[in-house]
Amino acid sequence: DIILKARKLTKFYQMGEVRVEALKGVDFDIYAGEFVVVLGPSGSGKSTMLNLIGGMDTASSGEIYFKDRPLHGAPEKVLTEYRRNAVGFVFQFYNLMPNLTAYENVMLSVEIAKNPLKAEDVLEQVGLADRTDRFPAQMSGGEQQRVAIARAVAKNPEILLCDEPTGALDSSTGIQVLKVLRDFNRRYKKTVIIITHNAAIAQMADRVFYLRDGRVNRIEKVANPVAPE
Ligand code: ADP
Ligand code: ADP
């Protein structure tokens, strides 16, 4: 089943006289349960694509659907509902609440979700059963990112949308975090989309979308996705 579909998707930014074409007509289908990496250099349109997929911004033209529901031209109310229930967000810098424990950070998303998972279960699955009462400042970067993943997963979203999730981590810690994302993908059969400039992440995806200068110029199927060593 197709969970996200884009057709001739464009995004322009008008800066005075200058029009920047950040996305120049992007087409893709993403299937439910897929692990997709969107790979592109700085300025290729990654953040713009993330914002359209995540319902944080609207397209200039073209179409984008979540399970046949149009996000293009959708009212803010629909987009808010989509962000709140359908998408879990993981960011480069974790975005945890510093004055709340790991458990309380996860409960923040459990409390607003329609059909949440149990915070304790998800914290255990990311390997933090013994860290639930720690505050972010008492945890390593990798642990903080695993709390952030637990928070995103706990609301039981259909899509986990990750923006440079290993960008602030050293490579071995980054690999642990990627394994947690892959485990989530395989365990719950939920769609994971990682947006990154880091080509090493591509080998664990089912498919890789290569973004260049506002276009998806190649889509590659990975024969045997493996977590990096
Ligand atoms: P990436 O995330 O791959 O670095 P972006 O989506 O941020 O790419 O940017 C794509 C292009 O759009 C770049 O040329 C960037 O300068 C431009 N751009 C991004 N956001 C804005 C904005 N809010 N206003 C004007 N130009 C923008
Ligand atoms: P609320 O109305 O509860 O503040 P929002 O509609 O602003 O919720 O956001 C819903 C969800 O979407 C939040 O859980 C948040 O993580 C995510 N979100 C909102 N805005 C952004 C953004 N600009 N970038 C990334 N994620 C966002």
Image: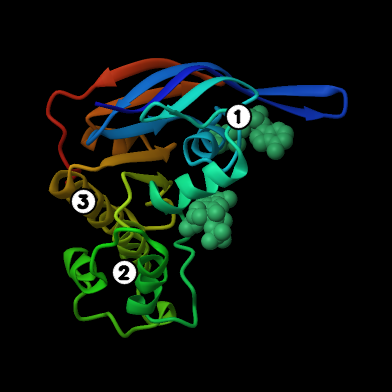
Expressed as whole percent of the image width and height from the top left, the position of residue 178 reads: 26, 50
Label 2 packing within 10 angstroms: few (<14), some (14-19), many (20+): many
Query: In screen coordinates, is 69 left or right of 129?
Result: right
The residue under label 2 is: 143
Mark in the foreground, 1 or 2: 1
The residue under label 1 is: 73
Give the spatial CA distance, label 1 vs label 2: 38 Å
Secondary structure under badge 2?
A: helix
Q: Is the CB–ligand 2 distance for label 2 below 8 Å?
A: no
Give the spatial CA distance, label 3 vs label 1: 31 Å
Secondary structure under badge 1?
A: loop
Q: Who's the residue at 30% across and 57% down the image? A: 153
Label 3 packing within 10 angstroms: few (<14), some (14-19), many (20+): many
Q: Who's the residue at 49% across and 74% down the image? A: 97
84 lies above or below 190: below
Q: Is the CB–ligand 2 distance for label 3 below 8 Å?
A: no
Amino acid type, residue under disc 1 in the picture: Gly
